[in-house]
């Protein structure tokens, strides 16, 4: 039977529970243990697929086509593992399943209730993932804040599981320790939220305190006393430059010893040496470049979290700090690209949906193509690059994606015939990992170093095969295709330092220990030798 670590949050949301969970996992891995994470979300959506990135940050995509909470991305990046739909449990998916079972008559005429039917469903799901993964540790992050009505039933299910499996559970509570004007750290919110957790029948074993700086010994002792945890089990989580430092900070405070002691385990020798080196490289790079991201949710960095991380990873590998400048595509429509892109070492046009801002993206792409600025287009970015090329190089006036202009004379980006038939929102996307075959001798081949790759998708529209010949005749190179369905996956240009766009999202598979090849190559191209 594995050990379970449950991570809850208190005081307020947005304290980085996802990163905390991932960091605990990293430490355990570094001590020779295997882990599997599960994210619990209290919302009623079945998954994050229909959620607006303005409200909830990026929709993360897994190999199996899961459209998932962005915390799963933190887990994959820290733990260097591929996860899937079953690693995310939402209220919507649990209730949906219980209601289906009720309709099927599985409950044999019993009154179906939150306790025990919903709680049992939650417990079964957790145990199913645990059993299938067969790891030493199961990490369970409970989204939201303790006291929210939304996550009560999950907390109750976890309390029951812990009571049924004594000595197998450890509870970690993440809280905020604010600073007041005098510079003093205040512990009352932490005390209150631990009380709240205790009133639900859970005594935390470790308290991790987010604060602007390290907590003093005094403050740690005060929290320990009021919250009934040992003094060494109050861990400081101060502001840091790079998220990847957090496992190191926890370990300096002896977190793994506390975990092993509580769960009666002996660590197997290993350490975080390689991780420490990567973090050091990220903090003291030898150069600096600026990548401009022309997007639609540009003021909300969480909407492009994985791109930000992928650039960070590529920066570490290439020994440069990557400064990101976010530009709203609509601003380029108003003022032209020159003003925003003049100083860019590289430009990314990321994924997106809908017509707003597309003309700004297209003029940004024209600018980087003509001025030979390294460019990476992702998904919608590929669509816009094809539209730009069709209009300005092939002379197809008014070319567009039918997503933007259904009546365009040149629908170079279009829905596949089978997609046109269904009108269901959320149901017809090409989702998850698909094979892509790369042509030898291309920029894409140089980046990946192989001909067969597997990358993640989330889109409905595709390059229209009817126009392929005309685009290729004018110099567009189709360097990656999905052979099974004859779909364009990568395009690029010759006579340009780096101009490439992918139908898939390479950012979802980027890891600090293994940067995504297309980002790595972008950063390399954007780093002049003198930087
Ligand atoms: N809106 C485009 C489509 O649905 C691109 C989606 C994306 O960029 N993820 O095909």
Image: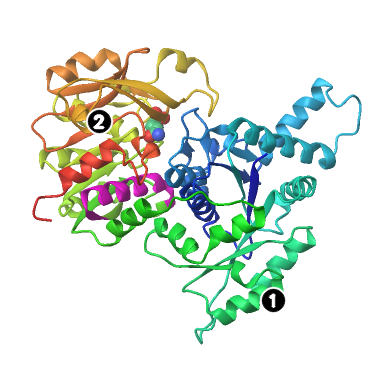
Residue ID at (69%, 66%): 193
Q: Is 303 part of what is drawn in magenta? A: yes
Q: Nearer the viewer, residue 249 or 431?
A: 249
Please provide the residue range marked out in magenta.
302-322
Quadrant in the picture for the C terminus: bottom left
Magenta span main SS: helix
Q: Nearer the viewer, residue 140 or 469?
A: 140
Q: Nearer the viewer, residue 406 or 186?
A: 186
Q: CA distance from mark 1 to mark 2?
A: 54 Å
Residue ID at (67%, 35%): 93
Mark 2 neighbour density, 10 Å: few (under 14) some (14–19) many (20 or more): some
x%, y% of residue 54?
A: 48, 49
Question: Compared to 490, does 7 lie above or below?
Answer: below
Viewer can see residue 462: yes
Discs 1/2, front: 1
Q: Helix or strand or loop: what does disc 1 sit on?
A: helix
Q: Is mark 1 within 8 Å of ligand 1?
A: no
Point out the quarter of the image occupied by ligand 1: top left
Which residue, given by chain and number where applicable, does mark 2 sit on?
448
Viewer can see residue 399: no
Which residue, given by chain and number where applicable, does mark 1 sit on?
225
């Amino acid at each position: 039977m594995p050990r379970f670590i449950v991570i809850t949050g208190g005081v307020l949301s947005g304290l980085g529970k996802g990163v905390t969970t991932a960091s605990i996992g990293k430490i355990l891995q570094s001590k020779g243990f295997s882990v599997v994470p599960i994210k619990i979300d209290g919302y009623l959506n079945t998954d994050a697929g229909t959620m607006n990135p303005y409200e909830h940050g990026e929709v993360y995509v897994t190999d199996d086509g899961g459209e998932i909470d962005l915390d799963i991305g933190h887990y994959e990046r820290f733990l260097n593992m591929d996860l899937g739909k079953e690693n995310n449990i939402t209220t919507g998916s649990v209730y949906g399943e219980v209601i289906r079972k009720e309709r099927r008559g599985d409950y044999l005429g019993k009154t179906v209730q939150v306790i025990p039917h919903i709680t049992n469903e939650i417990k079964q799901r957790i145990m199913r993932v645990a059993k299938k993964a067969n790891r030493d540790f199961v990490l369970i992050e409970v989204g939201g804040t303790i006291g929210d009505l939304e996550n009560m039933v999950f907390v109750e299910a976890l309390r029951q599981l812990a009571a049924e499996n004594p000595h197998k559970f450890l509870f970690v509570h993440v809280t905020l320790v604010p600073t007041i004007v005098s510079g003093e750290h205040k512990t009352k919110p932490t005390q209150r939220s631990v009380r709240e957790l205790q009133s639900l029948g859970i005594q935390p074993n470790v308290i991790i305190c987010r604060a602007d700086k390290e907590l003093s010994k005094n403050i740690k002792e005060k929290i320990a006393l009021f919250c009934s945890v040992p003094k060494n089990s109050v861990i400081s989580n101060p502001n840091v430059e790079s998220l990847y430092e957090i496992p190191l900070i926890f370990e300096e405070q002896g977190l793994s010893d506390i975990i092993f002691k509580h769960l009666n385990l002996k660590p197997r020798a290993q350490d975080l040496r390689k991780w420490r080196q990567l973090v050091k490289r990220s903090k003291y790079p030898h150069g600096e470049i600026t990548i401009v991201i022309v997007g639609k949710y540009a003021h909300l960095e969480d909407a492009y979290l994985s791109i930000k991380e992928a650039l960070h990873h590529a920066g570490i590998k290439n020994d440069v700090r990557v400064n990101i400048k976010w530009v709203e595509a609509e601003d380029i429509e108003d003022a032209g690209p020159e003003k925003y892109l003049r100083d860019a070492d590289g430009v990314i046009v990321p994924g997106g949906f809908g017509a707003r801002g597309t003309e700004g993206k297209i003029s940004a792409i024209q600018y980087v193509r003509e001025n030979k600025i390294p460019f990476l287009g992702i998904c919608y970015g590929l669509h816009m690059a094809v539209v730009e090329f069709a209009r300005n190089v092939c002379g197809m006036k008014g070319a567009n994606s039918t997503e933007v202009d259904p009546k365009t004379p040149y629908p170079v980006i279009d829905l596949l015939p089978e997609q046109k038939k269904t009108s269901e929102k959320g149901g017809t996307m090409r989702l998850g990992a698909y094979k892509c075959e790369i042509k030898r001798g291309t920029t894409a081949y140089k980046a990946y170093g192989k001909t067969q790759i597997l990358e993640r998708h989330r889109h409905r529209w595709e390059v229209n095969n009817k126009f392929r010949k005309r685009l290729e005749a004018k110099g567009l190179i189709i360097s990656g295709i999905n052979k099974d369905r004859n779909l364009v996956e990568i395009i690029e240009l010759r006579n340009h330092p780096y101009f490439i766009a992918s139908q898939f999202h390479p950012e979802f598979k980027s890891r600090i220990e293994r940067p995504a090849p297309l980002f790595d190559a972008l950063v390399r191209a954007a780093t002049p030798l003198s930087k």
